[in-house]
Image: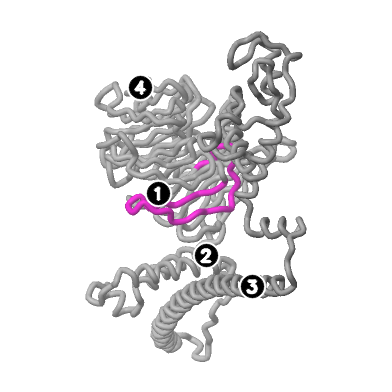
Amino acid sequence: MGGESSMGALVPSLYSEATTSKMPPPTEELDKDILCPICMQIIKDAFLTSCGHSFCYMCITTHLRNKNDCPCCSHYLTSNRIFPNFLLNKILERNYARQAAKNASPYEHLRQALQQGCEVSVKELDSLLTLLAEKKRKMEQEEAERNTRILLEFLCCLRKQKLDELNEIQTDLQYIKEDINAVERQRIEICRAKDRCSLKLRMFADDPNSQFVTQSGPIASKKKWVHAQFNDLQDCYLQKRRNWARQGYKEEERDTDIMNREGYNPGLEDFKSVLTNFTRYSRLRAVAELRHGDLFHSANIVSSIEFDRDDELFATAGVSRRIKIFEFSSVMNEPADAHCPVVEMSTRSKLSCLSWNKYTKNHIASSDYEGIVTVWDVTTRQSIMEYEEHEKRAWSVDFSRTEPSMLVSGSDDCKVKIWSTKQEASVLNIDMKANICSVKYNPGSSIHVAVGSADHHIHYYDLRNISQPLYVFSGHRKAVSYVKFLSSNELASASTDSTLRLWDVKDNLALRTFRGHTNEKNFVGLTVNSEYIACGSETNEVFVYHKAISKPAARHKFSTDLENDGDDAGSYFISAVCWKSDSPTMLTANSQGTIKVLVLAE
């Protein structure tokens, strides 16, 4: 309907534009005697009635098909009583000719005069040709001047742009020169200290001629890894160096310990930290594995996996309608077949999300497919609060870190609800226009909540004013499936457009986009720590990104039993991931019900 109405609005305007050039001047300027009383335009192909009135032939014949009277005087009239008005037609033709001559350009006047055989002498033609040639030269000069002015303006803009780029490059080169000198000085100091240490070691060694061999293998591997990610690392270095320069960093404000020890610029120090962390790991290694499913439940997808406050226990939940609690140390130390949950709690519906209370160790919240948000006591294995206000499936729940009695949930009913463990009804309700896929409290605030929505956006709310979001982060092309905070200022988001994005919630900035994994339809998990972001993939792989580099730092593929799985092996995907605090250890689970403990390794 909308398309038809919009086309209907456009066609008349296009029609009128196409016909106005052929139509005569407005009717107010014309003699009313030559206007057709029916269409109120200049009569075309005039016909005279027996009662003495003139009309367009098409107008009067169309009228007489419906009525047998004159439109002007209402006398009886039929098609046999109308006749061509030759005189009026001649007058109209002359009128058209005069109007065309009036509107014709000087060129048309000259062309018509010459075509009609106007008497012109050779001298007059020579004078006319000279005038035309002079006019042509003047027009060509004006056109050349315009083109030259445009070209000059373009070249000036290009020169300014390139000078700006050159200045930026020269500034960057100065940064690099200063940093090379600082690193060289530090390297010389390290070598001298190393030589002194080696000399002392040789003095105490049994063999005075023994040599200490440096292993070059790890260095070569790290160099290769750096060159593979060179462009991203270059952007990271320049960004940090320029940021510190723009801030006008003062000598007296610098960390004197760092400056005295290494003499590094703070921007270089930041980049060194990134480079050190980034080159520290290059792969994920599986150190433990357990099966989440059992013989009596074929639905084994793990939707959520979460560590408790002290990283001693972890909980799993999914479509099996059970919350299982495991001891992490037992999983690490016992054989794969011996892993049993220390606590198991059954639920009425499939589970979508878990969230441990970071203050009360034995409390955990869950959200399910019926829209119920439940707070459980793991010690008693009983629910202590059930919130049933959501009208559709609840996808996400999260406890506040700074206010442990508060939790937030989001649902397919397009509502975000704030709950308190001290009351049964919701404390606050935010109505949105699209399904809610993920909610998360800011770890440093109980009044700021991030909401990932099916409308492709992240809505960041201040709960003191929910009439509109504080910020709306746009960039994803599909639904935002997860939001997680790396810090109070850094927010990571995942989407079914196969990207992760990093945002600055303090300054309302998009920082980086991460690509490498595949995620087009499933919830594949997202987990973050202070340095790394990890997510699953629909290729049954786990991907790890350093927050400063847009390409994967490491990946691990879950193996499948091809004999038992057959053609279904390609349909498995990672369904949940969770870091163990700020450590290189991570819990991962896939849609087959396999749970692995992965560790970042060199």
Q: Amino acid at mark 4?
A: Glu
Q: Earlier in the sequence, mark 1 or mark 4?
A: 4
Q: Which residue is mark 3?
A: 131
Q: Amino acid at mark 3?
A: Leu
Of circles 3 and 4, which is in front?
Answer: 3
Q: Which residue is mark 4?
A: 386
Secondary structure at numbered mark 1 = strand
Q: Amino acid at mark 2?
A: Asp
Q: Earlier in the sequence, mark 2 or mark 3?
A: 3
Task: Check disc 2: other Cα within 10 Å, few if <14, some if 14-19, many if 20+.
Answer: some
Q: Amino acid at mark 1?
A: Leu
Give the magenta-colored segment's residue range. 498-525
Q: What is the x, y in percent for residue 327? A: 44, 39
Q: Residue at x 50, y 45 (%)?
A: 476
Q: CA distance from mark 2 to mark 1?
A: 20 Å
Q: Which residue is mark 1?
A: 491
Q: Which residue is mark 2?
A: 232
Please report contact status of discs 1 and 3: CB closer than 8 Å, yes or no: no
- Report whether residue 335 is seen: no
Q: Residue at x 66, y 59 (%)?
A: 107
Q: Quadrant of the C terminus?
A: bottom right
Picture quadrant of residue 423: top left
Q: Earlier in the sequence, mark 2 or mark 1?
A: 2
Task: Check disc 3: other Cα within 10 Å, few if <14, some if 14-19, many if 20+.
Answer: few
Q: Earlier in the sequence, mark 1 or mark 3?
A: 3
